[in-house]
Image: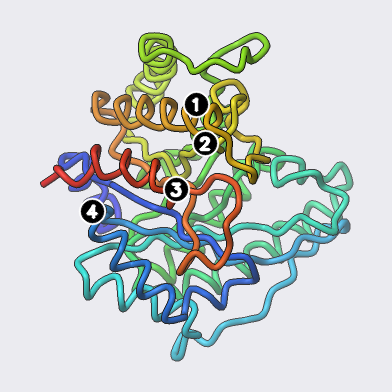
């Protein structure tokens, strides 16, 4: 299968140096001149993959709402970043997200349905959306069939059907972006080409002290995480890519890395963010089971300055130190 062959190639190279390019709106920015400029900047920093995350909405009754795409003429926000990235020798992963705001779900991992009718409606409309996205994403180099859907990922047969439906319209490598505490429970990894993990692992326990964690503390924490991931790799025969990896500039970043809120930068918060990201990239570099990471996140042309920014001078130095020396 061509997708599996491609991911084997990436695994041997262990060289996915990715960045998620996000947006402050529904996504038109991905087709803008600002996105083109950002791709050039990322290329200079050593990034060789980018990820974008198109949205559909989830309703309380399980309906996934989306605007169908014309695969013969994909919109600029999808086609242009693929084209421009390829011109720079970069690759693109499409990682669709369900927009849960305005719904009764607190986040994507909360999406679940006790009612069988609502659950059937969810999988039917979700399949229609994800196949529509995959069909329009033929030029992309990888595709995620789902992101952080731990509340419904236990329905193995439904997900195997989704993967098969996507493979019917898209020939590139496929993954599923599992939450960090979900990856070991996913039963359909064998149907995919690589294990995707949203790598917001809590590295330190207890109450944050406000001090900067030491390298040894962070490295020891990552050694424990990597041991579990190595076991997952051995059980499944699949390599692992961190479909998201990032930290906010906040003193709690090592304890609760999924939390944002560091919009007002402080020196202590930036130091913790830097220490955590450096340790995480060291971990990726030393573990053969992990073929790389997509950092979270960067905005096209810096249209918005929010949390989890990888574009600050301090973060750019970390990325450059880790990746610009890569072959």
Residue picked out by circle 4? 6
Residue picked out by circle 1? 272
Q: Quadrant of the N terminus?
A: bottom left
The mark nearer the N terminus, 4 or 2, is 4
Q: CA distance from mark 2 to mark 1?
A: 9 Å
The mark nearer the N terminus, 3 or 2, is 2
Q: Residues within 10 Å of mark 3 (few under 14, many from 20)?
A: many
Q: CA distance from mark 4 to mark 2?
A: 29 Å
Q: Are marks 4 and 1 in contact (CB under 8 Å)?
A: no
Name the one closer to the observer, 303 or 116. Answer: 303
Residue picked out by circle 3? 310
Q: Residues within 10 Å of mark 2 (few under 14, many from 20)?
A: many
- Secondary-structure class at tag 3: loop
Q: Does residue 284 appear left or right of residue 169 in this picture?
A: left
Residue appearing at x 43%, y 71% in the figure: 169
Q: Pinpoint residue 119: horizontal percent, then vertical percent.
A: 79, 51
Residue picked out by circle 2? 247
């Amino acid at each position: 299968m061509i997708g599996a062959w491609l991911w084997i190639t990436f695994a041997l190279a262990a060289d996915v140096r990715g960045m998620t390019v996000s947006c402050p709106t529904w996504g038109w920015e991905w087709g803008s001149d600002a996105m083109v400029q950002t791709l050039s900047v990322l290329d200079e920093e050593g990034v060789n993959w980018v990820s974008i995350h198109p949205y559909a909405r989830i309703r309380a009754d399980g309906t996934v709402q989306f605007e169908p795409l014309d695969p013969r003429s994909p919109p600029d926000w999808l086609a242009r970043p693929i084209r421009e990235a390829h011109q720079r020798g970069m690759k693109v992963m499409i990682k669709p997200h369900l927009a849960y705001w305005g719904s009764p779900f607190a986040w994507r991992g909360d999406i679940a349905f006790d009612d069988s009718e609502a659950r059937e409606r969810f999988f039917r409309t979700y399949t229609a959306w994800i196949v529509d996205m995959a069909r329009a994403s033929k030029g992309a180099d990888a595709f995620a069939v789902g992101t952080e859907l731990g509340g419904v990922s236990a329905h193995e047969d439904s997900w195997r059907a989704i993967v098969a439906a996507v493979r019917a319209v898209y020939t590139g490598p496929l993954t599923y972006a599992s939450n960090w505490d979900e990856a070991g429970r996913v039963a359909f990894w064998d149907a995919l080409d690589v294990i995707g993990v949203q790598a917001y692992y809590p590295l330190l326990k207890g109450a944050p002290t406000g001090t900067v964690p030491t390298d040894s503390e962070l490295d020891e924490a990552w050694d424990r995480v990597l041991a579990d991931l190595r076991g997952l790799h051995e059980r499944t025969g699949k390599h692992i890519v961190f479909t998201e990896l990032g930290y906010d500039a906040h003193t709690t970043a090592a304890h609760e890395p999924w939390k944002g809120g560091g919009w007002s930068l402080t020196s202590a918060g930036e130091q913790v963010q830097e220490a955590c990201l450096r340790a995480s990239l060291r971990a990726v570099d030393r573990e053969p089971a992990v073929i790389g990471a997509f950092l979270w996140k960067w905005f096209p042309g810096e249209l918005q300055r929010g949390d989890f920014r990888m574009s600050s001078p301090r973060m750019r130095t970390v990325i450059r130190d880790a990746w610009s020396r890569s072959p």
